[in-house]
Every structure is written in C-alpha cells, then in structure tokens.
Image: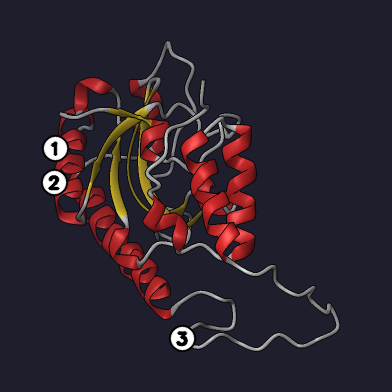
Amino acid sequence: MPKFTHKLTPEIIAEFSYSGLLDMKQRAISNDHKDVLEWCDFELSKRPVPAPVDPSARKPRASGTRKNGRAPSIVAAEKELNSQLEKLGRSLLEQYDLSKETARNLSKGSKFRAHSFLSKTGKAKVGGAKRKGRVAVNCFISYRLKTDIFGLAGVLEHNQPAEEMSFMVLAPKEYVNHFVSRAELLPSLEETDEIGLVHGGESFNNFDDAAALFISIIDRVAPKKG
C-alpha cells in the first residue's frame, strides 16, 4: 500500500526540473505510486540529460528568482501568510486565555505538553514540513489542550505557484466538517515524519474560510478573557 496519497497530476509533474523529476521518481518507487512513476519516466524521456555541473563554476541567478533561488511571488506569499497568521493570532490572544499555564490546568490527568500559540517573537511558527525541506512554505499557529492539537496553517508544495497555497485547519474529526487524514493534507510528508498528535483536519483554498473555522474551534475549546 502507498505510504501517503498525493495531489500530483501529469501537468504538475511536467513543471518539475530534471533533478526534481529524478527525486520524485525515487519517491514514487519507494511509495509504490505507479502513476507518478509513469509520469516521471515520460517527462524524463522527453528531456536531454543535463551536462555534469562544474562545482567550481559560479552559478548564474535564474531570471525572476532571488539569491536563494525562491521566486519573488513565493517570498511575497509567505510574507503575507505570516502577516495574516500573526494578526489573527494576536487578535485571538486578546479575546481568549491561550496561555500555557491555563492549558496545563485544563489538561490535568492527560499526557500534556503545552504549545505557545505564537512563536517566541510573537509571530507565526515555522512548520516541520518546511524545516525538513518537504514544502516551499509552511507557517502556522496552534493551541494544545489535553491530547488534542488545534492549528491553522498555510502550506505551499514545491514547484507550485503561490496561488496554489493550501490553508488548513488541524483538528480532531469532531471539530471539522470535511475531515481528511494528515497524508491528504500534507502529501509531501513521509510516513516516518513526526508532526506530533496531528492526525488530520480540513483544507481550504483561501485564508478567510480556514480562519473562520479555526476561530469557531478556539471559541469552543478555550476560555474567554474577562
């Protein structure tokens, strides 16, 4: 059985670089995705094998990319996502008691490790999928209570335009309308990747819809201030 599902199509595969196709082909083999393997082989058959890279040669910057190789549109999308998450996070912190201390008191009797709602600097947190290099963008805010994690995240897969960013609410089944597994939410994750107690949630095409659901969940599980 495959280790995870994917959202790839022949059109998406066609946008991969030669090295990206080789990497995806190996992952397709490892995860028994015969359709992806066929698409990769087809694309590779149409392309000439690149010449070996001279490690001493200075690499020119591709047009439309920054020094780190990221397209300006991706950088701008990530900046906007961080701004949206930070703004929403600060607003929720003003209305609800999302402190570690209160969460710890409400979680007595269960195996518990408190989450900071925002990062130590008061901004959105960077997801493990981004730190592992699995995706191009992954930022989130989250709250933990007892054995449940409630999060709001934005994720953009590699080789995808900024407009294809997914916004997802991470929560147990009973808190969302259209629950899907974490493998469907984050197809770039390997089975061995650890993302804590997150088992799935619901995905949206825009930030506002995802934020509305997340706000309603926080209102159900977190005590209000005042």
Which kind of residue does numbered mark 2 sit on? Ala
Residue hosting label 3: 64
The amino acid beneath tag 1 is Ser
The residue tagged with tag 2: helix, strand or loop? helix
Q: Residues within 10 Å of mark 3 (few under 14, many from 20)?
A: few
**Label 2 belongs to which residue?**
212
Point out which mark residue 179 bears: none
C-alpha span from label 3 to label 1:
40 Å
Work out which residue is located at the far top of the displayed protein and give it: 109
In primary-sequence order, the first of circles 2 and 3 is 3
Residue 175 screen position, x and y as percent: 20, 26
The percent position of residue 101, horizontal first and vertical second, equals: 40, 33
- Residue at 59 percent of width and 83 percent of height: 67
Judge depth for marks 2 and 3 and give the one in front: 3
Q: Which residue is mark 1?
A: 216
Exactly how many numbered labels are in the figure? Answer: 3
Rounded to the nearest whole Å, what is the CA distance between mark 1 and mark 2?
Answer: 6 Å
- Tell me the mark number nearer the camera, choosing from 3 and 1: 3
Residue pictured at 40% horizontal, 32% vertical: 182
Q: In front: 167, or 139?
A: 167
**Which of 78/214 is in front?**
78
Q: Residues under labels 2 and 3: Cα distance?
A: 35 Å
